[in-house]
Image (spheres, rainbow, N blue to C red):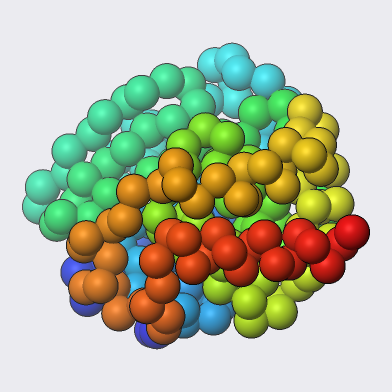
Amino acid sequence: MKGLAPKTLAVFDKVSALGSIKGYVLVGGTGIALQINHRLSEDLDFCKWVPKTNASHAVSVREIETELKKNFEIVTTNHLSFDQVDFRIDGVKLTFFNEVGLVCPQFTPITFTENILGVPLLLHGSMKVKTLFERITYRDYYDLFTLLSEKHFSLDELLNASIQYQPRLNYKMIIKRLSAWNLIKEDAGFTHLSPRYTVTTEEMGQFFVEEIKLLE
């Protein structure tokens, strides 16, 4: 399957058979890479949407862990909260997390395997924008750069979808963050992910600035 690093592909094939992942969707860079093959991705991030944080909505750690240990020799578990658990399997990080209190727009799931479903690219973009306010990394910036430069959707569509997804954001906040290329450190290890584009943070930032000008 295109878009996955070799070690991740090996884990992906086994994880796809797990019944405990039903109800989750694959998101993050991997969910994007499987659709547009813009770079290789190493981690697997599975998400579900819940109204609030409590035990009844918690990630099903024991159920998932039990299935993983039946399929992999060594499974390391890091139970961070009701809403997130990280597993380490054969050098691959496998995360299950809740998006809490956000209203996910209706969408038609994208089928990768029988048990692994994905989300449309515009929803990926909205989630990436939200992530830029939690952390700001080269890989997240690159993913948004690729989605916009290849015209999978427009900047205006991204702004509207992002604000609908996270109402605490507004146009000015998002535009300022997209323009803040100087806050992002170059990722020396990114080249081993075979990116389609070799671009600096400044080059991506200038692209966003030009796109923003078109909205004025």
Between residue 211 and residue 165, name the one nearer to us. Answer: 211
Place of residue 144 in the rendered image (x, y in percent of width and height, measured from the top left): 58, 62
Between residue 107 and residue 193, name the one nearer to us. Answer: 193
Horizontally, residue 88 falls left or right of residue 202, namely left
Horizontally, residue 146 falls left or right of residue 216, namely left
Image quadrant where residue 41 sits: bottom left
Instruction: State whether residue 26 is above or below residue 120.
Output: above
Place of residue 19 in the rendered image (x, y in percent of width and height, measured from the top left): 46, 55
Place of residue 167 in the rendered image (x, y in percent of width and height, measured from the top left): 81, 33
Place of residue 52 in the rendered image (x, y in percent of width and height, measured from the top left): 68, 20
Between residue 195 and residue 72, name the one nearer to us. Answer: 195
Give the farthest residue toward the right: 216
Residue positioned 79% across, 52% down in the render = 159
Horizontally, residue 25 falls left or right of residue 13, namely right
Q: Quadrant of the N terminus?
A: bottom left
Give the farthest residue toward the top: 54
Between residue 23 and residue 70, name the one nearer to us. Answer: 23
Q: Is residue 121 visible?
A: no
Residue positioned 41% across, 72% down in the render = 199
Horizontally, residue 166 falls left or right of residue 207, namely right
**Number of numbered callouts drawn:** 0
Instruction: State whether residue 83 is above or below residue 6.
Output: above
